[in-house]
């Protein structure tokens, strides 16, 4: 019976080193909520921001995307093979989308 308890404790330690604690996930969620609030403020101050509006939103979007990708999809803590497979798939998808837009003459004025 004590072996099962020790085995369970070891499994708990193993899980902790492969991911964040609950507090870590709460901190990330708060960080993402703050970024979302900044994006909402950007939408109301679009005229004052001028040319910085779109690049600012794109940067905030990229930060949120990678935070969700790395922490909530667990790519930061998993095998590098999973990250490689994701990035290859993402690159192929973006490439196909760019070819699709080029076919529709999206990039021409």
Image: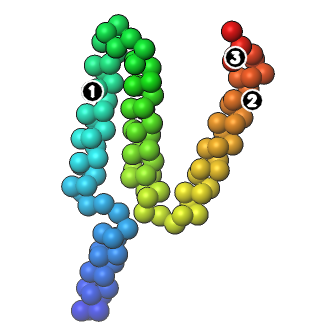
Is mark 1 in CB contact (under 8 Å) with mark 2?
no
**Secondary structure beneath label 1:** helix
Q: Which residue is mark 2?
A: 99
Name the residue tied to disc 1.
37
Colour treatment of the image: rainbow
**Residue 25 visible in rendering:** yes
Q: Secondary structure at mark 2?
A: helix
Residue most extreme to the left: 23
Q: Position of residue 88 (x, y in %)?
A: 65, 50
Labels 1 and 2: the sequence-earlier one = 1
Can residue 8 be seen from the camera position used here? no
The reply, left or right, for residue 109 in relation to residue 56 is right
Determine which quarter of the picture holds residue 67. top left
Residue behind mark 3: 106
- Mark 2 to mark 3: distance in Å? 10 Å
Residue furthest right in the image: 103
Mark 1 to mark 2 CA distance (whole Å): 34 Å
Q: For the C terminus, which image quadrant?
A: top right
What kind of element bears circle 3? loop
């Amino acid at each position: 019976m004590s072996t099962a308890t020790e085995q369970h404790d070891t499994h708990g330690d193993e899980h902790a080193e492969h991911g964040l604690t609950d507090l870590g996930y709460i901190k990330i969620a708060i960080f993402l909520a703050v970024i979302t609030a900044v994006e909402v403020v950007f939408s109301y101050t679009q005229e004052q921001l001028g040319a910085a509006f779109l690049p600012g939103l794109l940067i905030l979007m990229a930060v949120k995307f990678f935070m969700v990708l790395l922490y909530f999809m667990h790519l930061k803590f998993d095998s590098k093979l999973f990250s490689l497979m994701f990035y290859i798939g993402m690159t192929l998808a973006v490439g196909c989308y760019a070819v699709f837009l080029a076919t529709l003459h999206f990039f021409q004025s």
